[in-house]
């Protein structure tokens, strides 16, 4: 730490309590789901807040009024919208007479995207950055205790944060998603060349089916996306929730409008049209050379349109734009894997205040991680086996 530099930590009640420019300076190298416009947008439109069981509790570290570190924390009364599934832990705790809620989590709501959770100004020298990161974690632990939380959880965090937390006795949970990686492909056919002939033929057949139904698909980025597609995109999102029994509507139309108004440079949309009318689409976000698949849906059902919109045209556009990684979200691993998305490990850390329950969670995470890592290794070896 710089000599004489005084660091002060504070917990806030709203993301509006932090200047957007100062916040975004710190998250410049992070996914867009950590940007102020996204987090404040969720809060300002009512997607998070007291009525939803997501109480904003951002923690900040300042020196002389200058923002040096942030942690997007939330006090929660449930586990919905997190995508690190701990329902079994909560059930086990209830059966054992152990309190599991409320809990303090550090995460990007509704966004299972790896990123830093103890965020520090990237311009800080290493020693000062470590001090700020440590103070953030200290402050989070204090907030968890003083708010009566049963535990503290950092979801989809970075490996270096895992090391810091496990040194304090946190349980380390390993998960698996499927991400597309650009191996220097020249075009989509170059990508297809890596598959076995049976898989190549299946993908080509599915793409032909879409065209034969008279469905035209295009990819739009940023300013190319018209205002008129905001309403349909929200409708597609709702249609998916209504169709699947496990769907939960976390976002409202006002938040979609906020994305169009304030985050359009981050937006990427794949839209399918039939006879000129938009009938399906996927709303993605991208930043730098990474793309993140988020909200898919359709107002009319046509064969293979889901694969075309969420995978084939999206990947084709990634190749065209030089995108290096496409994270298509949680779930659907079998379908993603069969279409060239490789296993990618995710990390979360968990500290429960009940000693006996913490020990049980640690044992569970250790056993689970062994299985997850073995499965990821196997799938990676077999991804493009001819």
Image (cartoon, grey):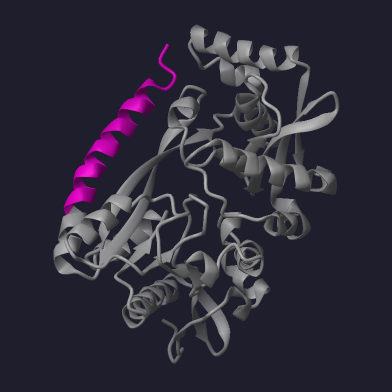
Residue 23: image location, x then y, percent:
60, 71
Residue 67: image location, x then y, percent:
56, 79
125 displayed left or right of 355? right
Residue 27: image location, x then y, percent:
57, 64
Q: Nearer the viewer, residue 75 or 161?
A: 75
Residue 338: image location, x then y, percent:
47, 22
Q: Does residue 287 appear in this view?
A: yes
Taking the spot 52% from the left edge, 37% from the top edge, the residue there is 244
Taking the spot 44% from the left edge, 32% from the top edge, the residue there is 333
Residue 372 in the magenta stretch? The answer is: yes
Q: Nearer the viewer, residue 331 or 382?
A: 331
Q: Does residue 121 appear in this view?
A: no
105 displayed left or right of 168? right
> Eyeballing the image, is 145 above or below 312?
below
Taking the spot 69% from the left edge, 32% from the top edge, the residue there is 317
Taking the spot 70% from the left edge, 31% from the top edge, the residue there is 320
Residue 57 in the magenta stretch? The answer is: no
Q: How many marks?
A: 0
Secondary structure character of the magenta stretch overall? helix
Residue 262 occupies which quadrant of the picture? bottom right
The N terminus lies in which quarter of the figure?
bottom left
Residue 325 occupies which quadrant of the picture? top right
The C terminus lies in which quarter of the figure?
top left
- The region drawn magenta spans 363-386
Q: Nearer the viewer, residue 381 or 247?
A: 247
Q: Nearer the viewer, residue 371 or 325?
A: 371
């Amino acid at each position: 730490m710089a000599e004489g530099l005084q660091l002060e930590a504070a917990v806030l009640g709203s993301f509006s309590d932090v200047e957007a420019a100062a916040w975004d300076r710190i998250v410049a190298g992070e996914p867009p789901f950590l940007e102020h416009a996204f987090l404040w947008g969720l809060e300002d439109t009512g997607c998070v807040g007291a009525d939803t069981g997501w109480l904003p509790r951002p923690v900040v570290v300042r020196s002389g009024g200058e923002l040096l570190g942030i942690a997007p924390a939330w006090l929660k009364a449930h586990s919905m919208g997190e995508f690190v599934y701990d329902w079994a832990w909560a059930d086990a705790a209830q059966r054992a007479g152990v309190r599991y809620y409320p809990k303090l989590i550090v995460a990007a709501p509704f966004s299972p995207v790896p990123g830093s959770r103890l965020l520090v100004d990237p311009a800080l020298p290493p020693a000062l950055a470590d001090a700020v990161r440590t103070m953030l974690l200290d402050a989070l632990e204090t907030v968890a205790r003083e708010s009566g939380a049963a535990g503290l959880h950092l979801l989809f965090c970075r490996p270096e944060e895992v090391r810091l937390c496990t040194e304090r006795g946190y349980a380390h949970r390993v998960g698996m998603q499927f991400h597309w990686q650009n191996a220097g492909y020249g075009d989509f056919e170059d990508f297809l060349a890596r598959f076995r002939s049976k898989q190549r033929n299946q993908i080509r057949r599915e793409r032909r089916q879409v065209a034969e139904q008279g469905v035209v698909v295009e990819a739009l980025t940023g300013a190319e996306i018209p205002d008129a597609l905001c309403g349909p995109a929200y409708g597609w999102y709702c249609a998916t929730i209504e169709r699947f029994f496990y769907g939960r509507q976390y976002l409202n139309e006002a938040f979609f409008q906020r994305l169009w108004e304030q985050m359009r440079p981050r937006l990427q949309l794949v839209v399918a049209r039939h006879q000129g009318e938009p009938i399906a689409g996927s709303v993605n976000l991208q930043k730098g050379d990474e793309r993140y698949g988020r909200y898919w849906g359709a107002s009319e059902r046509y064969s293979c349109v889901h694969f075309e919109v969420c995978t084939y045209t999206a990947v084709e556009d990634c190749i065209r734009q030089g995108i290096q990684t496409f994270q298509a979200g949680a779930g659907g691993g079998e379908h993603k894997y069969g279409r060239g998305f490789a296993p990618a490990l995710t990390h979360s850390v968990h500290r429960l205040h009940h000693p006996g329950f913490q020990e049980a969670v640690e044992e569970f995470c250790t056993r689970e991680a062994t299985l997850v890592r073995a499965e990821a290794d196997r799938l990676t070896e077999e991804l493009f086996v001819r």
